[in-house]
Amino acid sequence: MEKKPLVYFLCTGNSCRSQIADGFLKELGGDQYEVKSAGLEAHGLNPRAVATMKEAGIDITSHTSDVIDPEILNRADYVITLCGHADEHCPVISNTNVVKWHWGFEDPAKATGTEEEITAKFREVRDSIKSRIREFVETGK
């Protein structure tokens, strides 16, 4: 059986952006990729991220918020950071064949304002991540 490329999404807390990216790649990439996500810390799965993904028809309630696993990091084919902090503080990757990219997205968990405004920010970030994931699945870049 052919090994599927491993995509490892990293963020600071593994609660929102990396979880959304994980959910979309599993959905849009079908069985083309092995998908994992983690954070520099584990902040727990953000309930608004879960709700926003549910609106998009993707259930991420079974996801867990995990800390970066060096073994997974070093066997990943793609390491994709989704926030500047994770990009700047990503552990050293010993796998020299890894493709490391930074796709920066605003942190919707830092949104302020009314419930509607916060929800709108989550949707905006979700849709931006979905668009970027779709491009990755279609082009490999």
Image (cartoon, rainbow, N blue to C red):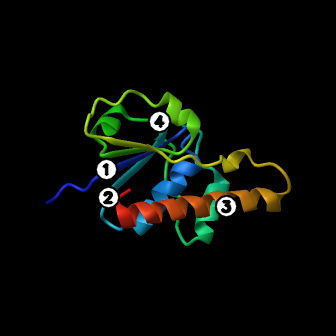
User: Does residue 9 appear anywhere in the picture?
Assistant: yes
The residue at which mark 1 appears reads as 6
Q: Does the CB distance between marks 2 and 4 fall below 8 Å?
A: no
Identified at 62% across, 70% down, the residue is 55
Q: Is residue 83 left or right of residue 74?
A: right
Which three-letter amino acid code belongs to the residue tagged 1? Leu
Q: The residue under label 3 is which amino acid type?
A: Glu
Mark 2 Cα-neighbour bin, 10 Å: few <14, some 14–19, many ≥20? some
Circle 3 is placed at which residue position?
A: 124
Q: In which quadrant will I find the N terminus? A: bottom left
Gap in angstroms between the C-alphas marked 3 and 4 = 26 Å
The amino acid pointed to by label 2 is Tyr
Circle nearer the N terminus (1, 3): 1
57 left or right of 8 in image: right
Helix, strand or loop at mark 3: helix
Helix, strand, or loop for circle 1? strand
Q: Nearer the viewer, mark 2 or mark 3?
A: 3
Mark 1 is surrounded, within 10 Å at the Cα level, by few (under 14), some (14 to 19) or many (20 or more) other residues, namely some
Discs 2/4, front: 2
Q: Viewer-nearest of labels 3 and 4?
A: 3
Residue on which disc 2 sits: 33
Q: In front: mark 1 or mark 3? A: 3
The CA distance from mark 2 to mark 1 is: 6 Å
